[in-house]
Image (spheres, rainbow, N blue to C red):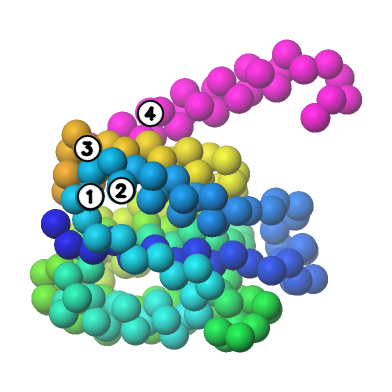
Amino acid sequence: LGKIVVYCAQAFRTQEQNRNLADRDIDVHAEAQRLLVEHKKSGIYDVEIHPQPTFSDFLDTMLAAGKTDVRILHFMGHGNSHGDLFWVKDGESRQSVRLSLSLHTESLELALKQSVQGRTLELCVLNSCSSLELGTKLREIGLKNAVCWEGDLDDHVAREFTKRFYSCLLSAHPGDYRTAFKAASLEVEAFQASVLQETSKQPPGSV
């Protein structure tokens, strides 16, 4: 069914991130590992992992998506309340850079149109905080499916969604993104409820 390209944009904490992201650490590599576990059970898609991608890496994949049979692009990393995403500054750097929502939209419009015309790119998963506006804009310029989040996204919830979504997509419903999304959403809601219940049982002051 084609290829899944995964971008693990692990943000190295900066002063700006600490201001915008409160105290939420993320582990995108653990999230990617969950995807790989589900992939190994089925082997339906080819999976390509980019452990520390720059924004240029992402654009290169978008432009070549039609030729390389990319069906799913999956971003996992930090986003702030304005919908901006954080990428690795360059391939040799341990610094991250914030790129604005408008820059993402402008830069991706041509790439997305070329990809969609090639009829390969079908889904973009934006597993980061406040990605709803970007996902909506991608739909407006021709992408058929986008998974995005409104407001803050807890790291545990992001990983659980990835696990459930691809478990459904790669086993019971290959290529059926809407069914996989609905199934994952229901299971994540149940997961959040169970976490809340367990937390409420802990003694005051415990972690």
Is residue 202 positioned above or below 116 on the image? above
Sequence-wise first label, 3 or 1: 1
Sequence-wise first label, 4 or 1: 1
* Residue type for callout 4: Leu
Which quadrant does the N terminus fall into? Answer: bottom left
* Residue type for callout 3: Ser
The answer to whether marks 2 and 1 mark residues whose Cβ atoms lie closer than 8 Å is yes
Sequence-wise first label, 2 or 4: 2
Q: Which mark is residue 39?
A: 2
Give percent across and percent down for residue 103. 47, 81
Sequence-wise first label, 3 or 4: 3
- Residues in magenta? 179-207
Q: Quadrant of residue 186?
A: top left
> Disc 1 designates what residue?
43
Distance Cα–Cα, label 2 vs label 3 = 9 Å
Q: Quadrant of residue 5?
A: bottom left
Give percent across and percent down for residue 61. 32, 78
Distance Cα–Cα, label 2 vs label 4 = 21 Å
Q: Is residue 148 left or right of residue 168?
A: right
Q: Nearer the viewer, mark 4 or mark 1?
A: 1
Give percent across and percent down for residue 155. 59, 46
Residue at screen point 59% across, 65% down: 10
> Disc 4 designates what residue?
186
Q: Which mark is residue 171?
A: 3
